Amino acid sequence: MKILVINPNDSDGMRGLIAQSCQAVAFAGLDLEVRCAGAGVASIEGFHDGALAAVGVLQQVARGEAEGVDGYLIACADDTALDVARERAAGPVIGIGEAAMHAASLLGCGFSVLTAQQKSIPVLEQNARSYGFSYQCRGVHALGMPVLDLEHGGDPALQRHLIERGEAILQQDNADVLVLGCAGLTALQPELQQALGVPVIDGVRAGLLLVQALVQAGLKTSKRNGYQSRAVA
Amino acid sequence: MKILVINPNDSDGMRGLIAQSCQAVAFAGLDLEVRCAGAGVASIEGFHDGALAAVGVLQQVARGEAEGVDGYLIACADDTALDVARERAAGPVIGIGEAAMHAASLLGCGFSVLTAQQKSIPVLEQNARSYGFSYQCRGVHALGMPVLDLEHGGDPALQRHLIERGEAILQQDNADVLVLGCAGLTALQPELQQALGVPVIDGVRAGLLLVQALVQAGLKTSKRNGYQSRAVA
Amino acid sequence: MKILVINPNDSDGMRGLIAQSCQAVAFAGLDLEVRCAGAGVASIEGFHDGALAAVGVLQQVARGEAEGVDGYLIACADDTALDVARERAAGPVIGIGEAAMHAASLLGCGFSVLTAQQKSIPVLEQNARSYGFSYQCRGVHALGMPVLDLEHGGDPALQRHLIERGEAILQQDNADVLVLGCAGLTALQPELQQALGVPVIDGVRAGLLLVQALVQAGLKTSKRNGYQSRAVA
Amino acid sequence: MKILVINPNDSDGMRGLIAQSCQAVAFAGLDLEVRCAGAGVASIEGFHDGALAAVGVLQQVARGEAEGVDGYLIACADDTALDVARERAAGPVIGIGEAAMHAASLLGCGFSVLTAQQKSIPVLEQNARSYGFSYQCRGVHALGMPVLDLEHGGDPALQRHLIERGEAILQQDNADVLVLGCAGLTALQPELQQALGVPVIDGVRAGLLLVQALVQAGLKTSKRNGYQSRAVA
Amino acid sequence: MKILVINPNDSDGMRGLIAQSCQAVAFAGLDLEVRCAGAGVASIEGFHDGALAAVGVLQQVARGEAEGVDGYLIACADDTALDVARERAAGPVIGIGEAAMHAASLLGCGFSVLTAQQKSIPVLEQNARSYGFSYQCRGVHALGMPVLDLEHGGDPALQRHLIERGEAILQQDNADVLVLGCAGLTALQPELQQALGVPVIDGVRAGLLLVQALVQAGLKTSKRNGYQSRAVA
Amino acid sequence: MKILVINPNDSDGMRGLIAQSCQAVAFAGLDLEVRCAGAGVASIEGFHDGALAAVGVLQQVARGEAEGVDGYLIACADDTALDVARERAAGPVIGIGEAAMHAASLLGCGFSVLTAQQKSIPVLEQNARSYGFSYQCRGVHALGMPVLDLEHGGDPALQRHLIERGEAILQQDNADVLVLGCAGLTALQPELQQALGVPVIDGVRAGLLLVQALVQAGLKTSKRNGYQSRAVA
């Protein structure tokens, strides 16, 4: 099984963190590749970044199709270019934001999302609503930090801050699962889950597992309606 | 990893079909057990059967907890006793109806469900709505056949009938994914998918993969709100 | 007219409180019976209790059918086994949680629910949503007390506490009706309504009136789709 | 107990039919009055008629308050001036459209509505949605006949036509309860229910029972938010 | 182009403020008339006022039709008698509450509404929901002041109070657009927008522009279903 | 007032049709420019085309900002890159699909959408839902023709076909307004409206009027949350 993980931004540090989390849950024998989109966007913070990155994601999917990739994971919590990639790919395509919300809805009665920047809140709220999780998603909250600052997850002060915010958010929202709404938080999932005592969902791990599962089940993206491929010259 | 699959009804033929589909997607080295609920319900057709079977599901989960089971799959498309099992279990619990709908929502723009009996339609509609798939679930349809008759899936006439109904339903609902809304159809997934040319989701395969994925990711059922365990004497 | 009120738990104290509230609103000449489910559950606090109690509710309905009962009231705010009972009964079946929410939606612009335990919040939220009251139900709140402690409603400190919580909840939710989300609070309805100056809905009274009204109107549970009776040996 | 039933239109024939259905379900000793709104609207067919009738309904409620009326029933399926009447009245106010939909939602998995004129369909659809019954209300259909023609319900051809339309609608909507969406159909409820074999809900009967029940339970309209009474000179 | 703006209440001061805002955005050559409904309601605060005013609005529309009016604006944030006016008029009819919410939904990710009185909150919430803005409308808040007190908008203390409430509401609701939910606030839009740094929507300006736009586009109210005109003697 | 209309595809024929419709509703003295996005996409048929075109739309907005443009219209019914453009622009940005749906919701009780290709149906359904028009949008239908074939609108056979489909769709959906879901149909609006006897909404006209209205009212895109501009080097 050959899976391509696309990091929509071009941060190699982020790519490394994503690759580590993927390795932690890869099936035995998985042919795994983690690539940056290559569109020249350092981090995805809002719609403008997302639009530029989308073209890079699309190019990576096109390259993946030529290489016989079986399934794709888009490793940004905004699920950058998800519909576009589904139209282009034969196999399943999963976004990490989507994967985390699906997993969260299966493990508790309601979840809260914690993302990096205030600016991303409407995007994630809109995604939750579009996926069907209006009820389960109790709130989306921001740390108020640039995405790339989260790469330095080893900082104990940052970890303490995250644990305190996480607990406060669960209380405020009366939620019982925490979704990490930024790929930059992927490395911190184990510590946060340990400290908070509830499921903490990292979409990178959840998403890679989900796409592997769909491929394993012999399932591909439907080409009947919206995702039918347009002839590409 | 130790997974317990619970067949809420007590049909051993059904149990065999479920076990076969599970084997097809089991992770290497999985310790897999498929058991009937043992509550004396031959097939689940409606609320009455579901209530009786629920007690059996609960007993199997209690036994599973004692045996160190890591995750559970409830193998009835009605997702019998799902909340109850989540309250009792430490690990994740997935229902096959739920698993199939989640998978379907990731592979297309809208799905139709095909179940055995007219009587099950409101149950599945209500579940789709409760999970958040009011938009994605375009219609729930019944074959008008008893559940146990579906065990004899090898019958070519039945297969042709299913393919015709499946195609008609996709047209009528303008859907692009077909969900099999009955565990009795599990063995027919490959043929149906082949014939219809769209993803056909069997919740048994999808569900076993999903529960394995959640366990692999180190995720358990949240015990903070609704699923906190009551002290059991 | 013969009505059977089923107390899903086996607390005889609770049964007595329920019977008193029922007597207060019984039609002249009503043949009223209030029985415990007999499934051995002392109080319903969560899904596990509910699943066990469901079998008892079902047995009481079966017995009621044999005795010519015209309608049923299930006297737990979780509306334990409501669908199951509807499938089994010919006449109408009402749950007290459901009855209270319907009544509340007819008397104000939005209602709040006050229940006993934190654990019941997701159940009641989910029920409100399933009945169609996502908009009208402004919040579900818990006292943080065991259900059975509420039987001692005569305690003036408890009454003062309830009045203060009730007022605070109405303010917080911008609601104008209070729903009592636990049968254990039934005896306190008059005092609470008097003190709060808004409608306070006790589902036991509302529910018995509702089921009497449906029987009086000659209405029964539809047997066409989901609630059609399965042949019972 | 003193209940005032207001017929928003000024058809005395309609008033007579309404009074008969009310008598059929009146509590023993009920002080029942059925009055036309007196605003000069012969039948309510659309928004214009409704606005004129609203002033008449309001005047009847004001008169009723002076006479010590305990509760009100508004006997038009459009629930003419329901909010206005609630603001003016101390006791509960119920509309027959609303009452029928509430009752229908308690007796089956989904209901269809049959009204007189095409023009009323959007009004009833909007009401169903506003009350919370988007899911339960499977369709609203029109006979394509003027409201007042329905007064002559004794015509066997009309009855046959209604039975055929009713059955067709239930099939088309996959519904199991039929709501009569016009007061003019009130007298035909018993025959229709008998013929269709499912609950057929007449809002006049259901509504009078509901308002009696709320009064009996000591419940009034909340005066805390939207329905607080404005000082009236 | 001939537009009639109807002020549902009979405050001439309010009429003057409305006319000023209309003039500020009138198309060149617009034949603009601003009239009070003439139903004798000083200000619209709740359902009772609205029902009386509705008859006046209807009479003004009837007069407008006779005079060849091309489009109508109803200048109360409750959108008094909007459906009624649409049924009676040939051209488009817009309410200022509706216009403001539509505009707000086009300029940001979520809006808050600020109205005069607590009593209007449920009306505006219900309208937002009915128009489709359940998601975009993050909260409706009241100043707790009589509508007519807002006419004296020149008072600096009132302006400061409004700016502080506006900012607090945006924070609390995580909203980025403010809707003025009362025609009495129309004159203050420029100052509030300047001070708050986000779009502040005055429905009078937005509504007049919208109705002019619809007339300019050659669009009228559909007469096919709910708004078909009833024959008027 | 300076408005830039961006045609996301690079068809100059389409640009000409769009410009004609814009001229028909331009305010006196409007400085109007209609440009193709220049991203090399001949027509937008699905997500892939949309992603490529988005970058072109973004470049045109950036250029427009440098030129002092006051407001933007995106002239593709898919509302290509709407969020992206809002983030980049100071003034209001409107999409023609969005404009048409808003206008339709103001003129009738429910609308149907007619687009060119089957593949666009899920995109338009999803947009309708995201804007809040789940209830008002009764159906989205496709002609089954390539977008660019619609440029030849003068063909009488095409016009007859459109009128027949339009009438059939309104019947099927019980709708009273028709939305043209493709810019290629813009020139045919007058004929279709004339023939169908209901409002037929062309988003190009509706959208240009709407963006002019918002600019005239002094309203810009909110920069507080999701649309705050990222610093652009």
Image (cartoon, coloured by chain):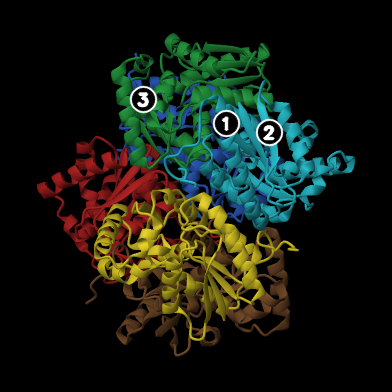
Chain colours: A brown, B yellow, C cyan, D green, E blue, F red
Which numbered mark, 1 or 3, is in the foreground of this view? Answer: 1
Instruction: Give the label on residue D116, or none.
Output: 3
Query: Which chain's residue wears label 2?
Result: C
Q: Secondary structure under badge 3?
A: loop
Q: Residue at x 37, y 37 (%)?
A: D170
Instruction: Give the label on residue C70, or none.
Output: 1
Query: Which chain's residue wears label 3?
Result: D
Say if labels 1 and 2 share a chain: yes
Q: Quadrant of residue A156?
A: bottom right
Q: Marks 2/3: CA distance?
A: 42 Å
Question: Which quadrant is home to the N terminus of chain A?
Answer: bottom left
Decide: is F29 above or below F39: above
Q: Quadrant of residue B124?
A: bottom left
Amino acid type assigned to the residue bearing label 2 in the image: Glu
Question: Which quadrant is home to the C terminus of chain A?
Answer: bottom left
Q: Residue at x 53, y 37 (%)?
A: D106
Q: Quadrant of residue E58?
A: top left
Task: Give percent across and percent down for residue D173.
Answer: 37, 41
- Residue nearest the observer in this picture, F176 or E148: F176
Circle 2 Cα neighbour tier, 10 Å, few/some/many (<14 / 14–19 / ≥20): some
